[in-house]
Amino acid sequence: MTIAHATTSRRSFLGHSYSVVGVVAALVILAWTLVAILAPYLIPHSIGDIVDDDYFGPMRQGLWLGSDYLGRDMLSRVLMGARYTVGISLAAVSIACFSGVVLGMIAAVTGGWLDTCLSRFLDAMNSIPSKLFGLVVVAAVGSSIPVLILTLAVIYIPGAYRFARALAVNINTMDFITVARVRGESTAYLIGSEILPNIIRPVLADFGLRFVFIVLLLSGLSFLGLGLQPPLADWGALVRENIGGLPFVAPAVIVPSLAIACLTISVNLLIDNLPQKIRDRDA
Amino acid sequence: MKSGVLNLVLKRLGIAAVTLLIVLFAVFFATSMLPGDTASILLGQAATPEAVAGLREAMHLNDPAILRFLLWLVGLVHGDLGTSYANEMPVAALIGGRLVNTMKLAGITTLLSVPLALTLGITAAMLRGSVYDRTVTILSIGIISVPEFMVATLAVLLFAVYLKWLPALSSVNEAHSLTDLVRIYAMPVITLTFVISAQMIRMTRAAVIETLSTPYVEMALLKGASRGRMVLRHALPNALGPIVNAVALSLSYLVGGVIIVETIFNYPGIAKLMVDAVATRDLPLIQSCAMIFCLGYLFLITAADVVAIMSNPRLR
Amino acid sequence: MSNLVEVRNLRIEAKTDAGRLVEIIKGVSLDIADGEIVALIGESGSGKTTVALSLMGYARPGCRITGGEINVNGKNMAALSEKERARLRGTDIAYVPQSAAASFNPSSTIMEQVIEVTRIHKLMSPEQARQRAVELFRALSLPDPEGIGARYPHQVSGGQLQRLSAAMALIGDPKLVIFDEPTTALDVTTQIDVLKAFKSAMRAGGIAGVYVSHDLAVVAQIADRIVVLKAGEVQETGSTAAILSAAHHPYTRELLAAFEPKPRQAHADADAGTKQLLRIDNVTAGYGAVRDGLPLIRAVDSVSLVVEKGRNLGIIGESGCGKSTLARVIAGIHPAAAGAIVFDGKELQRAARKRSHDQLREMQIVFQYADTALNPAKPVEDIISRPLAFYHRLDRQARSKRVDELLDMVRLPRGLRYRHPSELSGGQKQRVNFARALAANPKLIICDEITSALDTVVAAAVIELLKELQRELGLSYIFISHDLSVVEAICDEIMVMYNGERVEQITPDKLTAPTHPYSKLLFSSVPKLDPTWLDGLVRDPELVNQYGHR
């Protein structure tokens, strides 16, 4: 995920150069995070209250984002939806990346049969399409929030593992690892102190990317009616329940879609425009 | 050298076979975790305990899981996919026509998106940094960043609501003329093409750009080669492996895309069948559909790897 | 215009990561007459390749020609359009790259790439071009000139590829050929063949050349004139003989001084050399399938050696001879399949994992590439203080004090401790690398090609440092290198390896009279500063056939 960097304007500060796009993207992400945390204090109406006489009401004063198919306040529902979409995705991606990265580094450093077995098994897991996996698991055990988080995490562990392992394998061939090894260092030291600091940047970028995938998958599942169940509603579920408003171009169906796009595009742009450490050769 | 390639390909196929077994196992067990006793669900509320016990016996539900898995595998090999719980029809019969519909959708999408994506990806790489390249890159990143259903809803808004060119829903049975056909497939195909192409464009562009920065392309430049010659003669043949890989990988996104697209457009394909089966908890049907999807996905991933191996000039 | 090439006040800018513009070529001027070969010499980063490429009107991505004239054959390359430049590339001016292996397109045959120039510029029919190519292959003394063109690049050795890339350059009958360090990646015995082939082909065609190199001895063989570059500026220009005998510029003198044999210190310590520190007996190690407890592919084949306390052993040989594997076997990184390793009177386990902390501590290994041997994510002080914490359990304060001492020992300013490896120069990195080994308080340090990645002048300084430290600390070194002069400068004994086996062991004063035929070939292949050396070199063709990697 790299865009030509030359095109974006960059500013430098404290030995790092920042792109304007990256800063804006980071602010958007920060804003959504705050919304997710503070949603209960921000919503003007309770999410269950029917406040409009009409359904699919337009945007107007008091109902800034219009009303949904039952006449409920969309603004409140979208703000609360952020909680579920961001919260569930963040929990899932944290579990997925933590397990995947730790396993990947262990496999790379240890090698041998452990590496072979782990890689073979997780590669097999990877050859189950993610939506399908979600579909089957949800069919089997229902879709409570913990189940959703775990399912999403399990789906993305193989990818995180593969990514981290590939990076760690590269680092593992470096001489400084060999030096540490013949010094007699333990596997834990090798992983935590020698390998991790060298792969942390790409791993964080991968974290962001996987967060986007999970947001999209969660929204997709909810859109199919297999994600969060009513009365809870994340952004995908909001689109689903208001899809009837599509012919009228109701804000109730447009706004949650835009919210998803706004979040995922921001994350993608942030990853592509991370601050760069300035390494100038001396003139 | 030839035997080296053959060995690698055979090894890759072997891995695919092992993976398939693991995947089948996973699908079987995930579905057998379905809550509720299948026998009592089938017989309904009024069933006597004896009847339920009898049915359990008949369906081998009391046997250990591993035995049931093996029985299921034996059935698969003989083309017996089981019987649907919901309407007691053979699963094979339910799937048959639906599978053809999905294949048609996937086929048309492939025919459209592969040439489109390759052209855009390669030209963007050639004109790297230009306005054209930036537009293509930003559009593809945009499409990748939003859920498939959003691409679909936007397409509906544009073509069905504003322009009123196309119907929002598909119904294959009404296809009587070519124009009907176009109208039916247009929305699902457009949506899928967008979703698949975006991924493919990005990967193709990256592959070509990587080969364009190799020393042998610089060498070609220093021999006086034109830009076109550098790309066509030197970069593309070496980017072929990664590009075909990108194509196969992107096509495997069809599996996920098709599930959303068939649902949203009410397209009578196998994905819609499966989503419905999940709603009714129709176990044999879910198992079979999941298996078909995994097969297709595995086939594409394996094909990608095999092509990558074969296109490696060092193994020639 | 009298000269083929006249460069006047050339300026080239490069863009840094932060987008700042830096001038990397600062007003270079040089002339090349018809048929003359001019060498551009300088250390890495001096801009020698950038200047050479600019003669083709080309600047690598991120660089831009900002000023000056580059007149080649009457045309100013800097002012031409890209299309007009392309017309001259391959026909008027041709290029021989540093790494031929990377510069051949892996998916097309060698012949196709050699004659591509004639296709691009429509010089002759493909049939004629192929005939011409075969003639060139013959002139460059390539084996199987008729058949080699049908092969793919990966099926041909490095030395052959390098000559094939010369054929690729010569096929368009250029007036000027640019050689960009074409023999740097080759072994010395191969380098001779390639140099000879280049020289005779250039002489036969009366072609002018630019020869980019960091190696004065190589340049002395082939160039008529030498231009010394440093930091993007010309330091000194003169005929080869004049530069070699009467250099004016201090930098050139430094370069020359690095070639002079250093007087070796006599061992004042009479005790030294009486006690064995390391002895290995019939050690065998390798890769791949194992039969009868021994690997089928043997990198090291029953090698024995002894290192005495306070003395140094040099191990010399060409790439693939097993010298680096031997180092890794001794250190336990690559456990031996057979044989015994006795260190300080005790037999060591073959795998490092099974050795005790003290055994590991007393034997340290230092690797060739300081770039990969230092963790780029850590500052220098963390890198050096880890062995202090790990082996000596020093507390934070003691560690900090010791880090200062160690930096003093390797002659680095103390302030460097806060920097990361990427902020150090190559020589500084190698000193940190060495300081980390010293931090363990070892008795033996295995140095695996530690000066090979350094510029000549820097490498000479590092060798001097090693000698000093040995005097102060009573260390022993095993010094592995492909470079005879380096080993000669520091070692008391030299072991020659070929094909995994120990061929001969001699002392430096007997280097002129090796007994084994391979040692003879190897020692006689090392280029001398004398410009007549290559022409006067007579090699036993049977020896070359037997041992040369052709």
Image (cartoon, coloured by chain):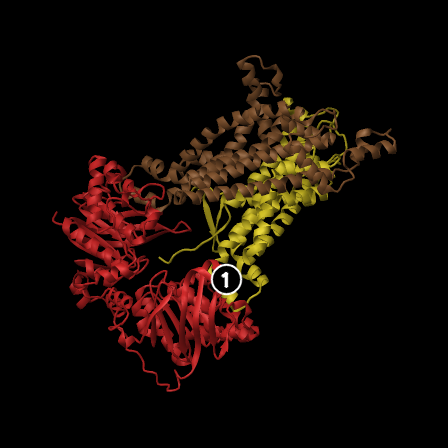
Chain colours: A yellow, B brown, C red
Residue A210 placement (x, y as % from top left): 58, 44
Residue topped by disc 1: A177
How many residues crowd mark 1 within 10 Å: few (<14), some (14–19), many (20+)?
Answer: many
Is residue A17 something one can see in this rendering? yes
Residue at the image point whose x is 59% and y is 55% from the top: A114
Q: Amino acid at mark 1?
A: Ile
- Left or right for C447, reference A31: left
In the image as oriented, which residue stretches furthest toward the left? C2
For residue C404, say whether it is visible.
no
What is the number of callouts on the image?
Answer: 1
- Residue in the picture at 40% in, 38% down: B128
Is residue C241 toward the left or the right of residue A155 in the image?
left
Q: Nearer the viewer, residue B308 or C97?
A: B308
Which chain contains the residue that carries disc 1?
A
Q: Residue furthest bottom?
A: C270
SS for callout 1: helix
Question: Horizontal and vertical percent for residue C2?
Answer: 11, 49
Whole-percent x, y for residue C253 in the image: 24, 68
Determine the image quadrant of residue B46: top right
| In this picture, residue B143 sits left or right of residue B34 | left
A158 vs C320: above or below: above
Q: Is residue C178 above or below residue B154?
A: below
B287 displayed left or right of B219:
right
Q: Quadrant of the N terminus of chain B?
A: top left
The correct choice, above or below, for C254 with respect to C97 in the image is below
